[in-house]
Image (cartoon, grey):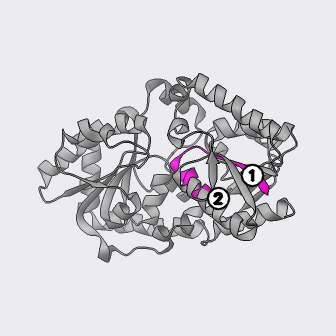
Amino acid sequence: MKKIFISAGDPSGDAHGARLMAELKLMSPDIEFIGIGGNAMCREGLNPLVSLEQVSVVGFWEVAKKYFFFRNLIKNCARILKNEKFDAFIPIDYPGFNIRLASFAKQMGIPVIYYIAPQLWAWGEGRAKKLADVTDLLLAVFPFEKDFFNKFGIRTEFVGHPLLDNPDFINNPGNADKNKNLIAFLPGSRKQEIVKHMPLFNSIAQILKNENSELEFGLSVSFTISKSEYESYLNKFKDWQLWDDSKSLMNKAYAGIVKTGTSTLEAALCNMPFAMVLKTSPISYRLGKRLVKLDNISLVNILAGKKVVNEYIQSDAKPETIANEILSLFNNGKRYDEILNEFSGIRKLLGEKGASKHAAELIIKELNW
C-alpha cells in the first residue's frame, strides 16, 4: 500500500481534499490516507487523527487559546510521520499548522506537495521563504499565484479552482430560478463565527423585515456545528428559514450577506450579489490589520482587482448600514447587473473544471507512481 499523510483544517479544505483523494484513488487505487480532515475526506477513506471541529479555528487570539492542543497535535503528527513510512505529505491550505508540519516531513525526507497555496500574497509574504524551504511542489488555485510563488523559488503549478469541480458551481445559474424575495445569510462554519455574526444578522434581518414584510430570510447552518449553538439566536428572530446546504441557498437567493473567506467566491459562482462581513476578536483584528497588505479582503474583490462588493469589517459592520446595502441591491437593477457581469469575469479567471484531476495527475507524476 502507498501511504499519504494529508491535512486540511476547515470545511472548504475538507471538501477539496475529498475530491483530490477520489481522483488519486482512481489513478492509483492502493493508497492509504492518514491525517486531518472532516466527514468528506473520511468518506474517501481518511484515517483521521482528530475531528475537523477541533482544528477549525481562525484568528490569532482564537488559535492562541488552543495553544496546548495544537502543540500536542503537532507532536503527535510528527511522531507518526517519523515512525511510519509515507510516500508524501499533502497539506491543504491551513498554513499556520501545515507549514510547521511540512517542516517535520521535509526533515524526514518525505516529499511535500502543497495543495491550495496559502494566501501569503495577502498577509504573509515574509513566510514565503519558509514555504520554499519545506515545499517540493505547490499546486495553486488562482492564476496569479504561479508568478507570485515562482519569484520565491517555489516550484508552482496552476491547476484551476476545485470549486468548479462541484456540480453546484459548474453551470452559471440564471436569475430565472432566483426567489426575488429571498436573502441568504452565511455566518460561517465555526462556532466563533456564529457567536460573532449571529447577533449582527438578527439585527439586520429585523430591520429588513420592518422595511419589507414580504422578504424571506435564509440562514445557512453548518453540519460542523450543533444546532443547539444556534438556538439562542433563533429565538430572537423568528422568521429564519434554516438551510443545511449553503450552495443551494445561494443559488436560490436574490442577494445575501456572507462572512469573509471561500464563501464569498462561492456566492459569486452562484450569481448572488452580496455584502461581505467580518467580525472577530479585537486582538485578532488588530494583528490581522497589521499583516494584511491588500486594500480588500473579499476574494471576489481581490480577483477583480477592484471593489465589486462592499466589505463591512469589525466596527464598520453596522446593522443599519448593511441592511441599506441589501435594500440597494434589490432596488438598483443597474448596479445588480454590473455585479453579475463582474462575477462572470471572475468565473473565467478560475479556469475550467477538472482542478482536482489535474492536481492528482501532477502528484502522481511527482511521485513517479
Q: Give the side of residue 314 with respect to residue 46, left or right.
A: left
Q: Give the side of residue 208 with respect to residue 42, left or right.
A: left
Q: Is residue 316 visible?
A: no
Decide: is 53 above or below 1: above
Q: Is residue 209 or residue 292 the one in the foreground?
A: 209
Residue position for label 2: 141
Q: Is residue 225 visible?
A: yes
Q: Residue at x 59, y 47 (%)?
A: 37
Residue position for label 1: 4
Q: Position of residue 73 (x, y in %)?
A: 65, 31
Decide: is 97 above or below 11: above
Looking at the image, the residue that sits furthest to the front is 1
Q: How packed is label 2: few (under 14 Cα within 10 Å), some, or many (20 or more)?
A: many
The span picked out in magenta is 1-17
Instruction: Decide whether residue 16 is among the magenta residues.
Output: yes
User: Mark 2 falls on what kind of element?
Assistant: loop
Q: Residue at x 58, y 51 (%)?
A: 13
Instruction: Decide whether residue 301 is among the magenta residues.
Output: no
Choose the circle earlier in sequence order: 1 or 2.
1
Q: Quadrant of the N terminus?
A: bottom right
Q: Amino acid at mark 2?
A: Val
Q: How packed is label 1: few (under 14 Cα within 10 Å), some, or many (20 or more)?
A: many
Q: Amino acid at mark 1?
A: Ile
Kindly indicate whether the residue at mark 2 contacts the one at mark 1 (C-beta within 8 angstroms): no
User: Mark 1 falls on what kind of element?
Assistant: strand
